[in-house]
Amino acid sequence: MSQSVAAKRYALALFNLAQEQGQTAIIQEELHELKNVFQTNKELEQLLGSPKLSVAKKKALLTDLFKGANVHILNTLSFLLDRKRINEIIAIVDEFNGFANDAAGVAEAKVYSTRALTAEESESISKAFAQKVGKQSLKIENIIEPSLLGGIRLQIGNSIYDSSVSAKLERLKRDLIGS
């Protein structure tokens, strides 16, 4: 999550508006795409932060780029341009996701495994670990990491659950050698 107080405030305002309108899931999905655009196109953020372009031209550019986007997202982008805070967009998306996930009883988790997890495996992991963190379910991002040798490593926020073969071998080595 972001450390920006402004990002948290903007995200909360957008989240409250999305809830009032019953559009939380739609806006969350569109914000995910928006974040991808800003993360993969660093030039866009630089262009929008440039003093050489007028705010009106920047707004026209964003309106053209995100034609089909939700009106609340377009208004938020416009507002951020007016306040010279467009660099906060990724932090705002992260904060919004936090609010939306909390409201839905969902936690985001990263599952590291040696191969892609099946839908059944993801569901099983979600059921087993969601209760441990006091949530209804987990939104799992599967990351392939062959160095685990087998098993999984799960990260939910700051908590890590490691049942990988490599971690077990490391613990065994420490127990046997004492180092």
Image: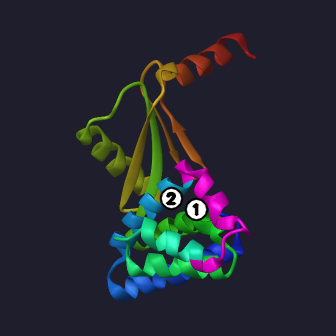
Q: Secondary structure at mark 1?
A: helix
Question: Mark 1 — residue?
Answer: 90
- Could you tell me residue 8's position as x and y percent? 62, 74
Question: Mark 2 — residue?
Answer: 35
- Could you tell me residue 160's position as x and y percent? 56, 42
Q: Is residue 55 magenta?
A: yes
Q: Is residue 16 magenta?
A: no
Q: Residue 154: give its label.
A: none
Kindly report the distance in space between the C-alpha atoms of the residues bearing marks 1 and 2.
Answer: 6 Å
- Could you tell me residue 126's position as x and y percent? 35, 49
- Could you tell me residue 146's position as x and y percent? 47, 21
* For residue 38, side relative to residue 18 (left or right): right
Q: Quadrant of the C terminus?
A: top right
The three-letter code of the residue at mark 2 reads Lys
In the rendered view, tell whether residue 145 sits above or below residue 122: above
Name the residue rendered at 46%, 18% in the picture.
Answer: 149
Task: Please name the colour scheme applied to the rendered image.
Answer: rainbow
Residue extending furthest toward the top: 177
Q: Identify the magenta region.
A: 39-56
In the rendered view, tell whether residue 63 sits above or below residue 175: below
Q: Is residue 10 visible?
A: no
Name the residue rendered at 54%, 76% in the picture.
Answer: 59
The three-letter code of the residue at mark 1 reads Ile
Tell me whether circle 1 and circle 2 mark residues in contact (CB < 8 Å).
Answer: yes
Q: Is residue 24 visible?
A: yes
Name the residue rendered at 66%, 76% in the picture.
Answer: 54
Viewer-closest of 92 and 43: 43
Viewer-closest of 37 and 151: 37
Magenta stretch prevailing secondary structure:
helix
